[in-house]
Image (spheres, rainbow, N blue to C red):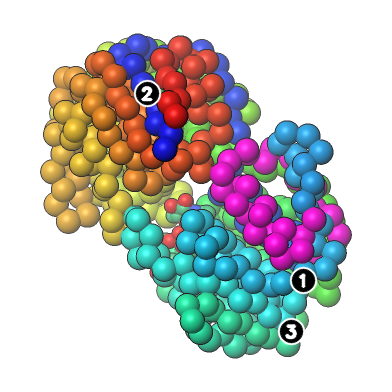
Amino acid sequence: MEKLLIRGGVPLEGEIGISGAKNAALPIMCAALLTPETLRLAKVPRLMDVRTMTGLLERMGVAAHAPEPGALELTAARIADPRAPYELVRTMRASVLVLGPLLARCGEARVALPGGCAIGLRPVDQHVKGLEAMGAEIRVEHGDMIARAERLRGARIVMDLVTVTGTENLMMAATLADGTTVIENAAREPEIVDLAACLSAMGARIRGAGTDVIRVEGVAALGGAAHRVMPDRIETGTYLAAVAAAGGRVRLTEAAPDTLDATLDKLREAGARISVQQDSIELEMNGRPHAVDLRTAPYPGFATDMQAQLLALDTIAQGTAMVTETIFENRFMHALELQRLGADIAIEGNTAVVRGVERLQGAAVMATDLRASASLVIAGLVAQGETLIDRIYHLDRGYEALEAKLGALGARVERRR
Ligand code: UD1
């Protein structure tokens, strides 16, 4: 299994370009199922999850073609097999995003229930509830959701809780429904706005994406379109947190600073000097960070996908920080690994109490999920000596060219097989 060796303790300095957003690319790829015409995408990140999603679409009969790196053309002329099997859904929960588009286009779908995942229960009841309100019949058989609908019809759906992929699934399904769908208590994440922009380019009629009420007027058919995937705000935040922790100066280009307010506020509170231009961000950090408290929340609150990285920053901060996780019930697995590097963290319910220590020391650690792995990389960059991170396939799911980008900042990072 591949490992990442980091020799820490050097400040980071340089400029790197931000990739397209994983969490925007995955739902947008599923939108290709809604039309027989070609969807042309640019800025698709080269990530394991994108390859998995391409494979899933291909086995349904979608033609996938990458004319150049970062470009992807998807044509679902005919959907031969509207199924997402457990082997794929298990490795990538976002596979559930095919459910809404398949139902809308084919009137049937068979999608494995995602089951448990390392960071928590993550059920899909809200996806099901919304599709049922639109007239779908869904039953569970042998671990699969089997869904059917003659033609979905518009409905008013009040989500019981804010769910990102749930909102995306319903928004996609509603584009081809008969009549208008109103999704209330919708998620407001920027990736939903990006998906809505792509769907609109395909001919969908959507209003309110980015607010908590989304209105979709169904149309008879959607067509092909070209769309550029938005910049990855979590990748951006991860590199900013790394430099805030290790010290130094970075310029991130091709970014979307307006999607990062909560993270930038916290990094400023930690003592980083940050300046923002239209599509780039500069951060400079001298000395030890100050401890920052945080509480995760749906957008525009502080992203759960940035919690582990800021917690890593807090491990070497001056003072004690309270980090509260409200979205996923089991998202502190990185805490135990960070302790192996010398961090002082106590978990009390859904709060981590992090007492900043002056320095971390390199050690062998294990990546447990995508963002937890990112926190170990940050800690490894700060730690004195060598940190060897095992199971880095988690990182490859979400960070394009991680070693190359860190290397461009002067970090001493290498992949070991
Ligand atoms: C998406 C992101 C993920 C991020 C998460 C929260 C993608 C591909 N993934 O995941 O990176 O960490 O948003 O910002 O975009 N829930 C239910 N019932 C449902 C759906 C969700 O109870 O039907 C609960 C979940 O268990 C969780 C919370 O709602 O506690 C939020 O989950 P959700 O927003 O759905 O996360 P994902 O869309 O899976």
Q: Residue at x 42, y 38 (%)?
A: 1
Q: Amino acid at mark 3?
A: Arg
Q: Is residue 7 left or right of residue 417?
A: left
Q: Amino acid at mark 1?
A: Ala
Say which label, 1 or 2, has the lower sequence index.
2
User: Residue 243: image x %, image y %?
Assistant: 39, 21
Report how far apart the C-alphas of labels 1 and 3 lie in the structure. Answer: 19 Å
* Range covered by the magenta-colored residues: 35-63
Q: Residue at x 83, y 75 (%)?
A: 220
User: Residue 286: image x %, image y %?
Assistant: 32, 12
> Quarter of the picture for ligand 1?
bottom left
Q: Is residue 142 above or below residue 207?
A: below
Write down the residue under mark 1: 80
Report how far apart the C-alphas of labels 1 and 2 lie in the structure. Answer: 44 Å
Q: Is residue 280 above or below residue 369?
A: above
Write down the residue under mark 2: 5
The answer to whether residue 329 of the structure is visible from this angle is: yes
Q: Which mark is residue 129?
A: none
Query: SS for tag 1?
Result: loop
Q: Residue at x 46, y 67 (%)?
A: 114
Write down the residue under mark 3: 151
Q: Residue at x 63, y 28 (%)?
A: 254
User: Residue 271: image x %, image y %?
Assistant: 31, 22
Which mark is nearer the camera, 1 or 3?
1
